[in-house]
Image (cartoon, helix red, strand yellow):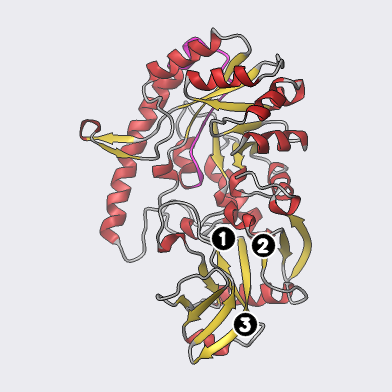
């Protein structure tokens, strides 16, 4: 038995005994410890918080108040504007946008234009922004995105997300010149997200050969990218000498990306909540901080309980690793014929026989912020007490995607 996990379960049950499930919590002791670990791994470089992995303004404010964190990496233009109007002064939109109304609002407000940086990897995106200005003449801050994927066998094999088309330093420099030549825009940053390193675990339980292959791939990817990113930064700085930032990395690669001289700041967010997809790394170990509880509503037979709801799959390629994990009590598993259900979820295992109607099963989501799309509030746990309940984006009526 994992006695620490058993203590956590008892603590969470006591803290939330006055609340009805389903409910979601954030263990603030774990959240703060994870924040400290990210700062330690960043080795002095500031961490820009990925808002999609948090999706709660109160917790964004909490982490940004800590030394070592600076700025937000957002995921839609509407969210960026909302956060900027809420007082967050440095918001980098990590993805290109086609939100014409949002660009009109940005171009027409000097405070917003100074707070929000948008992502560009194609001149056509500049044209869309210009067509959307609706008379707004504010200068738009622009970040260019570098394709970080690893190409093998002469480019016939690609490892990494399909994001920016800008792979070579000369391509980035050419776009930087195009931005500089276009009135109303200014390049202020360069970003590269190496998801095949930062977002892929290298220690898969029961799969040693696969894990070794991932580690070999990631070592090669880090070497190739470090050299290419440094060259890309030099090429862009030749066009934009006053480049403000170079952003890279993610929770799974903080210390490796921070070691690159060309990188000035690190992006991370999932490492604050530590969802189940971040259990399989050799380079760090976080503490699960965000969980949700579903109530036991049926006992169909020996070794089986049924909880209300629970079918909250995460984004990405469909598979068992995208399902929430029945976490506490330990030892429960899904019925392979039913899986995680929309309205009810049967769970199998000997711990089921100790659960009564109304008891809780605690789950961990596969990914971080997506949990907040299911719940209006996060109950903040300190010790064995809920000390506050704070709204998620959903609880504030904000569903950006």
| Residue 27 - label | 2
> Residue drawn 64% across and 44% down?
400
Separation of residues labelled 3 and 2 (CA atoms): 25 Å
Whether pointer 1 and pointer 2 mark residues with C-beta atoms closer than 8 Å, the reply is: yes
Q: Quadrant of residue 218?
A: top left
- Vertical position of residue 315 compared to residue 134: above or below: below
Local crowd size for mark 3, using a 10 Å CA cut-off: few (<14), some (14–19), many (≥20): some
> Which element carries disc 2, helix, strand or loop?
strand
- Which quadrant of the structure image shows residue 65? top right
Q: Is residue 158 above or below residue 233?
A: below
Q: Is residue 1 visible?
A: no
Question: Looking at the image, which residue sits at the far bottom?
Answer: 302
Q: Nearer the viewer, mark 3 or mark 2?
A: 3
The mark that comes first in sequence, 3 or 1, is 1
Q: Identify the image quadrant of the C terminus.
A: top right
Which stretch appears magenta? 235-251
Mark 3 highlights which residue? Answer: 297
* Left or right side of 53 for 252: left
Q: Nearer the viewer, mark 3 or mark 1?
A: 3
Residue 239 at x, y percent in the picture: 49, 10
The residue pinned by badge 1 equals 287
């Amino acid at each position: 038995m994992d006695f620490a996990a058993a203590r956590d379960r008892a603590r969470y049950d006591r803290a939330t005994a006055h609340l009805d499930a389903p409910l979601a919590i954030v263990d603030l002791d774990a959240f703060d410890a994870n924040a400290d670990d990210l700062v330690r791994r960043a080795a002095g470089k500031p961490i820009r918080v990925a808002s999609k992995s948090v999706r709660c303004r109160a917790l964004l404010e909490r982490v940004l108040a800590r030394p070592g964190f600076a700025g937000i990496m957002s995921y839609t233009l509407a969210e960026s504007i909302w956060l900027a109007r809420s007082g967050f002064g440095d918001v980098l939109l990590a993805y290109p946008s086609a939100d014409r109304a949002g660009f009109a609002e940005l171009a027409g407000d000097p405070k917003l234009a100074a707070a929000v940086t948008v992502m560009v990897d194609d001149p056509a995106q500049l044209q869309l922004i210009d067509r959307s200005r609706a008379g707004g003449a504010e200068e738009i801050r622009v970040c260019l995105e570098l394709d970080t994927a690893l190409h093998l066998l002469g480019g016939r094999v690609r490892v990494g997300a399909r994001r920016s088309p800008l792979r070579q330093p000369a391509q980035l420099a050419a776009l930087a010149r195009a931005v500089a030549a276009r009135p109303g825009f200014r390049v202020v940053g360069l970003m590269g997200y190496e998801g095949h390193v930062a977002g892929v675990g290298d220690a898969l339980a029961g799969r040693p050969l696969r894990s070794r292959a991932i580690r070999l791939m990631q070592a090669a990817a880090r070497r190739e990218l470090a050299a290419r990113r440094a060259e890309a930064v030099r090429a862009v700085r030749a066009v934009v000498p006053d480049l403000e930032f170079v952003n890279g990395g993610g929770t799974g690669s903080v210390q490796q990306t921070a070691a690159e001289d060309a990188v000035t700041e690190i992006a991370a967010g999932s490492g604050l909540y530590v969802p189940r997809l971040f259990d399989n790394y050799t380079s760090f170990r976080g503490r699960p901080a965000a969980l949700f509880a579903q109530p036991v509503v049926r006992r169909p037979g020996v070794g089986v309980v049924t909880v209300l709801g629970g079918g909250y799959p995460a984004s990405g390629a469909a598979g068992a690793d995208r399902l929430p994990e029945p976490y506490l009590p330990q030892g429960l598993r899904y019925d392979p014929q039913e899986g995680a259900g929309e309205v009810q979820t049967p769970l199998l295992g000997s711990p089921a026989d100790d659960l009564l109607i109304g008891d809780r099963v605690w789950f961990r989501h596969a990914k971080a912020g997506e949990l907040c799309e299911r719940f209006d509030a996060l109950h903040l746990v300190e010790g064995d007490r809920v000390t506050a309940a704070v709204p998620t984006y959903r609880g504030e009526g904000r569903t950006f995607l």
